[in-house]
Amino acid sequence: MIEVKIKSEEKSYPIIIENEAISDLREKIFANLENYLVVISAKVEKLYGKQLCIPKERKFVLKDGEKEKNFKNYKKILEYALKLKLTRKSTIVAIGGGVVGDLAGFAASTYMRGIDFIQVPTTLLACVDSSVGGKTAIDTSFGKNLIGTFYQPKVVYINPRFLKTLDDRQFKTGLGEVIKYSFIEKRCLCEEELNLTNFLSTEDILSRDEKVLGKLIEICIKLKKSVVEKDEKESGLRRILNFGHTYGHAVEKITNYKKFTHGEAVVEGMRFAFELAVSKNLIDKNYKFLADDVMKKFKFQKLPYFNKQKMIDLMLMDKKSDGKSLTFILPTDYSTVEVFELSADDL
């Protein structure tokens, strides 16, 4: 078992990484819970419902897909919580990917002004990114994650066994965020030397060896921990975690969240950022070629070009933007990035 403690202004909480039977994990989650509601991904319910053995009346099954992270489902979860007569001493448990965690976490943060929240991420993307740091949100027709809160979970349980049943595309979308950490590692200011870029050369990542995945997740969590503990509310350093996301979120929005996964969009956003950095002489082409090789190792597809003005308009609506300039995280050296405020003409 690996335990990483996250310290926040609000509270500290453990992230527990353990490769164990799903039935044993169930005992840990529900051991001391009385009145609770579980929000679970439909796919996870289908694959692991029997092992998790959650009472039907305490289960809200959420369809899969980014489009489900909306006002309608947020309202349904709150009404379900009220129906179960959840109190301020009750708990909402999220079992699934980032959509489930973001939505259930937002519901928990607003129900009776905040009740306990447990995260059980079941995708690589959620394990290394969305389950850490306390961001919760829902999407609107204007863009992604524009309505949300910073709200820390009580505990996060990560079990690499869930990743065995992820389809290849969803596994790779998580690798998109993993690669991001390798490009920002030095800027994360982690006291521990983790060398993620070197670790990415491990062959057993794609074969999903559980011990290797456990170590990979641990490295990413430690890097994110270093950032979020220094800047919990994204007022400074934490913005580097958005490397690839300004362009990536616009790709997701312009294709209505249906054509490309989050990881695919973020990888394309990182490619865009490296091209932009070369054009502005922030980095030399050799570093860009090295970065291209890292992304090629995991065979991410090159996405098509999109209408420039539409993309700019969407990027100006990004939650990191002030509506006048475009906020880009750009590489400036090996595993180092900085925040830049750019005009549309700079693109």
Image (cartoon, rainbow, N blue to C red):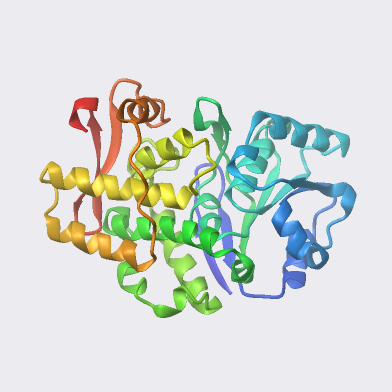
Give the tally of numbered discs: 0
- Residue 192 percent across, percent down from the top left: 34, 67
Left or right: 228 as drawn, with respect to 338: right
Near-viewer residue (298 or 225): 298
On the rendered image, what quadrant is the C terminus found in? top left
Left or right: 27 as drawn, with respect to 312: right
- Residue 143 percent across, percent down from the top left: 49, 30
Q: Residue furthest front?
A: 304
Image point (26%, 60%), residue name: 292
Image point (37%, 52%), residue name: 267
**Above or below, comparing residue 229 to residue 211 in the picture:** above
Left or right: 250 as drawn, with respect to 272: right
**Above or below, comparing residue 249 to residue 4 in the picture:** above
Near-viewer residue (24 or 213): 213
- Residue 81 percent across, percent down from the top left: 81, 37
On the rendered image, what quadrant is the N terminus found in? bottom right
- Residue 137 percent across, percent down from the top left: 57, 36
Question: In this view of the protein, can residue 343 be seen by the observer?
Answer: no
Near-viewer residue (264 or 26): 264
Image point (64%, 42%), residue name: 105
Q: Quadrant of residue 43?
A: bottom right
Left or right: 127 as drawn, with respect to 87: left
Near-viewer residue (138 or 112): 138
**Above or below, comparing residue 159 to residue 288 in the picture:** below
Question: In this view of the protein, can residue 285 be seen by the observer?
Answer: yes
